[in-house]
Image (spheres, grey):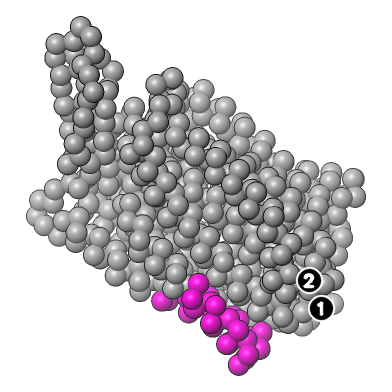
Amino acid sequence: MAGHTKDLTVGGPMRQIVLFTLPLLVGNVFQQLYSMVDMIIVGQTISTDAVAAIGATGSMAFLVIGLSFGLTSGFSVVTAQCFGAGDEEGVRRSVASSAVLTLLLSVVVTGASVCSAEPLLRLLDTPGDILGDSHRYVYILYAGTVATMFFNLSAGILRALGDSVTPLLFLVVACVANIVLDYVFIVDFGMGVAGAAWATIAAQALSAALSLAYSLGRFPILRLRRRDWRVSWPRVRRQLATGLSMGGHMAIVAVSVMFLQAAINGFGTDTVKAFSAAMRIDQLATQPMFSIGVAVATFTAQNYGAGKIRRIREGAFRASLLCVAMSFAGCLLMVLSGGWFLELFGIGENEPGVVLRAREYLNTVSALYFLLGLLFVFRNALQGMGRNVVPLLAAGTEIVLRLFTAPLFAGWWGASGICYVNPLCWAVAVAVLLTGYGLAIRRAGAGGAAAEPEYGSVVVSYGGQPTLASATSASARIRLEKRPEGTTKSSVRIL
């Protein structure tokens, strides 16, 4: 139900994950429609070359969008851990520091991305006939990074509290606004691909503003007080460590995808067009698995905060089975309906070579979707436990593999070879993640008969006064500088 927090530390793990995933899935599908709607409307109203121009920026857009999503999701993991531990003050302080960190980092990311847009397009060997439109589109997306980051932050905070429905509602608002603004800017104002980018940014800004205003008014736990804005350096360090890990992971994957995009660009505009449309369809088909992974991150974080390690293990196992089932469904969808999706982008019988290349990619990668599903589950489980090194290591293997295999496979088998790069990367990354996950679970003591919680919540207060200090580790040492005047009692609660 919208507007309500949800405790994921109780109830059947499979049921909780599924119920939490469903709104996420619908929301993520709507979020994918941002880029798809842009390309569909552009393809129908401008040209398929304009589709290629937007598609050529896919890996670059993913770099900033993925980084933004990873950073804000990492900040929200700490919020979810505090919520799972019953530390309401920790939740509020986590939200406050998340907002400040998001604002500061959005300025840094915007400046760096705007300055690097055109050089990066040239470095990726973007075909000259679409370079101008590609630069206009991605430049505007980069300039609106602050809207993207706060859009993701508002959703991440609500998911941390167990509410995956409210973010869905505002994603729907954003998607509808994006469609309307696409037609206004592209068709009525004649702004071309730049209009599609402006529509996306405006829709995200609108949805972020509405979501933040609604959340602060609706959820008492998010009503911040002056003292919640005081800097807690240990919390900030934890949030930065988790956020930079998750954001860095997404950025590394995005950079590795750029190597793939560079190999695609080398085959000319028609190949770019085929892979651009196919990859957008591919992203839509994998949303069920991606959504399950996001649900696993929140489920794991809350249960890790509550010290329920066995429950984490059971949830990850059942989520894996669910992802495998979803992967087969996605494969069937691609085989049966891939051609129909391509027609939405204006790619049909008049371009048989483009259709053939796009179908080849979809059929190849969809057969191995189950690897991607396992990657999503175990990467998010590790990040939900605060284990950030292994996901970064897995991302590092992906960038190395794409760096070498994209040009190698393209040289051996032409554009067909590119179809096998991603599945190979998924397989190796899954092996790394499974190894790290097994070690993390054993380290947390899940195999014992009575495993001790590695993380709980220590809350210190005096004589009924508000909480003075807290930490999310039962072994943490908390130093209080002074006793509040007029108090005679102190208490320590371990949750």
Q: Is residue 263 above or below residue 154?
A: below
What residue is at 77 percent from the left and 62 percent from the top? Answer: 134
Q: Quadrant of the C terminus?
A: top left
Q: Residues within 10 Å of mark 1 (few under 14, many from 20)?
A: few
- Residue 426: in sight, yes or no? no
Tell me if 72 is positioned left or right of 297 in this view: right
Q: Position of residue 243 (x, y in %)?
A: 44, 49
Give, as a three-letter code, the residue at label 2: Ile
Q: Which mark is residue 347?
A: 2
Q: Are marks 2 and 1 in contact (CB under 8 Å)?
A: yes
Q: Is residue 413 magenta?
A: yes
Q: Quadrant of residue 172?
A: top right
What residue is at 21 percent from the left and 30 percent from the top? Answer: 479
Q: Position of residue 309 (x, y in %)?
A: 22, 51
Badge 2 element: loop
Q: Residues within 10 Å of mark 2 (few under 14, many from 20)?
A: many
Q: Position of residue 180 (x, y in %)?
A: 77, 43
What residue is at 26 percent from the left and 57 percent from the top? Answer: 313
Tell me if 370 is positioned left or right of 168 in this view: left
Q: Is residue 46 above or below residue 154?
A: below
Q: Is residue 443 magenta?
A: no
What residue is at 66 percent from the left and 38 percent from the top? Answer: 205
Badge 1 element: loop
Main secondary structure found in the magenta portion: helix
Give, as a three-letter code, the residue at label 1: Glu
Residue labelled with disc 1: 351
Residue range highlighted in magenta: 399-428
